[in-house]
Image (tube, coloured by chain):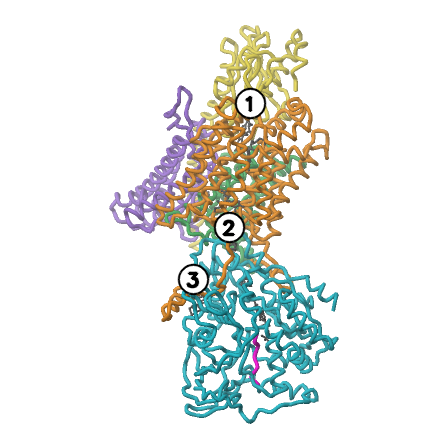
Amino acid sequence: MSGNGSANYWQIFKNGLFGENPVFRLALSLCPAVAVTSGVKNGFLMGVAVLFVMVMVNATVSLIRNFINPKVRIPSYMFIIATWVTVTDLVMAAYQRAVYKEMGLYIMLIVAFAIVLSRAEVFASRNKLLPSIVDGAGMGVGFLLALVLIGVFREFLGKGSLWGMQILSMNGKPLKPLLIMILPTGGFFAMGLLMGFLNWIDRRFFGGTGASGGGH
Amino acid sequence: MQEASVKAHATFSGGVHPPENKDLTAHKPAVRAGLPKRAVIPISQHIGAPSKPLVVVGQEVKTGEKIADSGGFVSAPVHASVSGKVVAIGNFPHPLGMDVTSIVIESDGKDEWFPGIKETRDYNLLGPEELRKMVQEAGIVGMGGATFPTHVKLSPPKEKPIDVVILNGAECEPYLTSDHRLMLDRSSEIIEGLKIIMKILGVKKGYVGIESNKPDAVEAMKKAAAGSPEIQVWALKVKYPQGAEKMLIKVITGRTVPAGGLPMDVGVVVQNVGTAAAVYDAVRYGRPLIERYVTVTGRGVKEPKNFIARIGMPFSQLLEEAGGLTDSAAKVIAGGPMMGMSQYTLDVPVIKGTSGITVLSKSEASVKPYGPCIRCARCIDACPMKLQPSIIGVFIEKGHFEDAKDYNVLDCFECGSCTFVCPANRPIVQWVKRAKKELLKKKN
Amino acid sequence: MEAAAQKEQQKSPTQLIVSIGPHVHATESTAAIMWSVSGALLPATLMSVYYFGMSAVMIIAVSILTAVLSEAAVQKILKKQVTVSDGSAFLTGLLVALNVPSGIPLYIPAIGSFVAIVITKQLFGGLGFNIFNPALIGRAFILISFPKLMTTYYEPLTSAFGMDGKTTATPLGILKEEGMARLLEIFHTKAALYQHLFVGNRAGSLGETSIAALLLGAIFLLLKRYITWHIPVSFIATTALLTWVFGGKEGLMTGDPLLHVLSGGLVLGAFYMATDYVTGPSVRSAQIIFGVACGALTALIRLKGGYPEGVMFAILIMNCFAPLLDRRVRSKVFGKVEAKGVKK
Amino acid sequence: MWEHVFTVFIASALINNFVFTRYLGLCIFFGVTKRMETAVGMSFTFTAVMMIGVALNWLIYNYVMVPLGIAFLKIVIFIGVIAGFVQAADTIMKKVTPALYYKLGIYLALITTNCIILAVPLEMAGEHMGLIDSLTLALGSGAGFSLALIIMASIRERLDLADVPKSFQGLPIAFVLTGLIALAFLGFSGMVTL
Amino acid sequence: MKDLLRITLSLVVIFVAAGVIMGGTYKVTSPAKFYAEKKEKEEALKEMAPEATDPIRPAGTWESHEKPYEYYVATSGNKPVAYIASTAGKGYSSFVKMLVSLDTNFIIRGIKVLSHGETPGLGDQILEPGFLEQFKGKSLNQIVLIKGETKENIQAISGATISSRAVTNGVRDAVKMLVDKYGAGVAATAKEGVR
Ligand SMILES: Cc1cc2nc3c(=O)[nH]c(=O)nc-3n(C[C@H](O)[C@H](O)[C@H](O)COP(=O)(O)O)c2cc1C
Ligand SMILES: Cc1cc2nc3c(=O)[nH]c(=O)nc-3n(C[C@H](O)[C@H](O)[C@H](O)COP(=O)(O)O)c2cc1C
Ligand SMILES: Cc1cc2nc3c(=O)[nH]c(=O)nc-3n(C[C@H](O)[C@H](O)[C@H](O)COP(=O)(O)O)c2cc1C
Ligand SMILES: Cc1cc2nc3c(=O)[nH]c(=O)nc-3n(C[C@H](O)[C@H](O)[C@H](O)CO)c2cc1C
Ligand code: SF4
Ligand code: SF4
Ligand code: SF4
Ligand code: SF4
Ligand code: FES
């Protein structure tokens, strides 16, 4: 992973969006990508939650990076992550009742997302505050965009709606092109097909290897 | 006898029924082929160490004279099959593929026999040792195709006592009828040969296994064996590869040769009927192995025939005697279509293991492209060794040799049944051969 | 062809063909098999047309066309050799058609065939490599996507043309929702019920209704050795046994196995779909395990599941396990003391 | 009672299989199913850690956190407990049974960042489950996950031999495959109601 | 040694800081959450009986599927205007939890589904008004699920019969319970139509 402290913030940010998109490229923290994307809205809110956590964690870590002893590095990071996730969880639970009912569990599970820890470890722990925040933001936004993309794909095909607004309809009744897309099965299909498609584009037009990573 | 032939109907599981096409030559008595003008005699016509030439270019030799001596215990001497002059010693094409050092004798057409050869009327006074020596000196090797030096088979290690000898007259290969004709012409010699082999091995039980599609041969052999209760002649179900020794032993003795093991592990020695006849000739008349029955057949030859041909006879000359090739001739095979080797030149000679020359026409020989395995399991049902050729094939195709080994590819004896039945035309035997090479490479 | 082998070919002065043996082949071919299986389905297909008329014709045509065209298209895109002539895509399309109810909008079987060929078969490497039964995945896909339409069955037509049949529940559906009593109300006697099921004059997916026609084809396949008894027999027997033991309202052993065997997709599934070479185990003993498991799952889903029919899911679930079976259960090699253990 | 336990087990193993119906544990699921050995190794390790982790967390949750009214710290505490326990297991195994450690040790590290390992305790806390139920859930989830891993591994090993289109090799086809398995497992749906 | 001290020190600091952050958040959010929940519940109940002037309080609990559920009597000036019960029905993959409200003649006024875990797209069709509206104005012995056209009774959603049945059964149980408790008069009619 490219994590040098070069002050070119746009580079760092973009890297999270495309070069090392957490979901499609690094293939990290895949669960939520499938789990909460049956609708655009949930995907978006999940993305925001992750974005918030990543920015805060990166910031915290880079702030105290010289202060933490390497021996207890990882545990401390995990503790920091857990802290910010708890904050997010509590806030969501209080002010986003409806959404929280559906995806509360996944919000809490952000704590297990390898992507957060790996950025803290790979980037924040070696960079100054600002770059770290930008990196967190980049990764977070990349994650968010991925979720939204999958969400659009699934909700549109599955419910014929976007962000809960019915778009397709046939003589008054809502038209649901492919119900299956909002079921677990459909989630996996969506991921697989999108990944394959992006790989294809990458190979075809950018001469990339078109390989998606794997595992955590 | 009676219950024997009844029992004979039990058979091994697996196997296939390729069209026999034996009627092309089955009814034609073997005729003596002319002498080879230039006999090309490879110094290795057997499994094991090549033999060492004893002659030099220019030297005169007589028919039956030893021209190359054993290169070790697992080896066999080679004899001149015609009288004449050694004109060359060098690499020449060999029916088994690669070029091999061969001794070329230009025939003087007189066919004068080597004086050193003498008969032994009262050979049954001789002991096992002397008999074995005679077999070895005569350069006899397995004539069923395996060409394994016979005297080696006849000297089993102490810890593997032999109690049964089986003569293999199955001739399950399509087209071939040389063993068939041999059994009709020389039944009593074959039985005598069997008795000699049994004596050498000190065995009390002998069998002759013959596929029941040769009733006349079964009759002839039964008649010849009538006087000898220790010998039984069995009619076997017609199914390829009935002649494979493991299958033969299973059917006749009910014994199962352990995977990777040899017949002697279950106290059995299997010899081809031709081998037995050769043994008799060697012991009774002191004749070395310089000629054999050869079936020249297939839609690609004008007059399919059974020949008695000298070793070293070039395919081209023998084919001429069979009227030559038809225009449709497309593939020339040393041996039968199932296990035989297709040839790229007609200069190759008849050797000790050449039971036939099969010439296929274009329509028969066209090589169809192969498709993916559809897992239909026909090959699994067909495999007499009960392997899973389908999976083995896919593994090798993708270069996973170790996995193929894990699926026992090494137990495959390349009978080709799987490849024969495969609806996707998959060249499994070819792959198996490659896998064996690769695995061997890895081993050393 | 082997590079090496070709090298040999060049060595050849005369035009002799050189190849590794065996030099003769059985006349069987992949295409022949696939087309024969399609042929074996002809009786069932004709019956479906007889019972469900024009709608059946259209559905069958559309499914097959979509299947074949998608296969050709994908192979073109992937720059592979186009092999639609081998008949496997045709067969898949036909089976998709036989697995959907009559009167369904044509785009649904079309989607089914597309998913079957593109996602289930070609994405996984095409003929011989797919893990799941394409036709059944196609069916499952559209079943979940259009549950209403896919579970709306029509009475067979009395007049062979026009679509005036009225919708109804299928025998299994009724059995599940209302019970045996209701079935007897409709058909009066059990004999009449069985007879209707056997000739196929009942609601259901196109190809599954006429048991007689299906068996006719099945016998042909068995005689020609295109399929063996192992999977179908163990499959059907298990379902029959379990539905007999547990299927009854009044305690054990009061179920009606015959009804369960005759209704639903069981016969079609057991003889034509569970037998798919590619997606099942190939060692015979493993095939029996496969069949028994399919039967057990079918009974389980029919009796306990949220669905009237379980054949499709049973087969699909076992498709998941086929590679595992292939791994664990191997043919017993001639002369091997005990079949060699699996590599761990 | 036992019937209930059985139901919970089946439900968590098959019907609500974590991977196929709840999309959890994917990272590991895709990570270790390239080969059968790793899949099997992970199955054992995972189920064991799962059982013990849930037991510990159940005790701590019901006898420490609830009384102290700090249930809202469950995320921090649960992950702490699991991470700590895994660390301990790691060191202990290395000392006590090095053999086993070299077989399974590698997987321990991975497990800490696995969703399921955390999801089950959280669920247990959220639904105020009893000890028996919690352990059954843990066992069921472990079994379900193991089943998923082993099926997937056996299929992917066969997939190695297939010529999958380039762009789809690796993860994409694995996802589609998982989707198909999930589709098949829908057959179990509706069998029990929790 | 010194090293160890630094480690512990740093950890302690982190813990404290984190503790403060989380504790603080909790302080702020937990009341908010509490009120939000309370409000949700009250609004739900209010929806069931808009004209009730007095706050709606639990009148007792009853058992359904081995779980306790509450029931309420909505009053305006101590005069009952509606009977409300929370109830549940066994569905395809979950229990469908609902609120049912009856007028004083034990005719259904409305249904509200509080939560369910049925299959999206199939089971969750029970949320569609078209289905729930059917219950309005029906009395106990009319609450029977029919597969096929019906005005008199409750028509099942095809493709979701099981979920439909969950709702119907849940409602019927609740209505029966309320009738038994409060409707001495109408109780007679309640005998049949019970599964
Ligand atoms: C597939 C297969 C088929 C064979 N068929 C025959 C046969 O028909 N006749 C025969 O004599 N040997 C046949 N053999 C060779 C025998 O297995 C065995 O090697 C031979 O009979 C031994 O006798 P020999 O050493 O005298 O040749 C076959 C071998 C294989 C692998
Ligand atoms: C091979 C095959 C498998 C089937 N599997 C299923 C299934 O798993 N689930 C289902 O609802 N329908 C399935 N169907 C369609 C059912 O048979 C359909 O529900 C059937 O028409 C029910 O009518 P019955 O009562 O005659 O079975 C299948 C059909 C066939 C031909
Ligand atoms: C994956 C899957 C999910 C299902 N979900 C539900 C559901 O949530 N609610 C339901 O009533 N039926 C559900 N079903 C069961 C079928 O819809 C059931 O066959 C149907 O309710 C009975 O058909 P009918 O309603 O047309 O009579 C589901 C079936 C499957 C295969
Ligand atoms: C006996 C037999 C049964 C078959 N059954 C099916 C089937 O159920 N569904 C299907 O899509 N293809 C079927 N096929 C066609 C083909 O095998 C199948 O599409 C392969 O899975 C394609 O790789 C069958 C073929 C045979 C020979
Ligand atoms: S016979 Fe050919 S196609 Fe059939 S399983 Fe064997 S290798 Fe595959
Ligand atoms: S695998 Fe070997 S032994 Fe088996 S049938 Fe094929 S060639 Fe004969
Ligand atoms: S596969 Fe083996 S035997 Fe066949 S040509 Fe290649 S190397 Fe030779
Ligand atoms: S076996 Fe023959 S054909 Fe095969 S590679 Fe070797 S030389 Fe070529
Ligand atoms: S995000 Fe769930 S295991 Fe990685």
Q: Colour of chain E?
A: yellow
Residue topped by disc 3: B362
Q: Colour of chain B?
A: cyan
How far is disc 3 from disc 1 in space, using C-alphas? 71 Å
Q: Position of residue C270 (x, y in %)?
A: 59, 41
Q: Which residues are magenta?
A: B138-143
Q: Amino acid at mark 1?
A: Ser
Residue B268 appearing in the image: yes
- Residue at the bottom extreme of this rendering: B115
Q: Position of residue B187 (x, y in %)?
A: 65, 76
| Label annotation for residue E164 | 1
Chain that the image shows in orange:
C
Residue topped by disc 2: D153
Is D103 above or below relative to C298?
A: below
Q: Quadrant of the N terminus of chain D?
A: top right
Q: Position of residue A168 (x, y in %)?
A: 38, 25
Q: Could you tell whether A168 is left or right of C50 in the image?
A: left
Mark 1 beta carbon near ligand 3 (under 8 Å): yes
Chain that the image shows in purple:
A
Q: Chain of mark 2?
A: D
Q: Chain of mark 3?
A: B
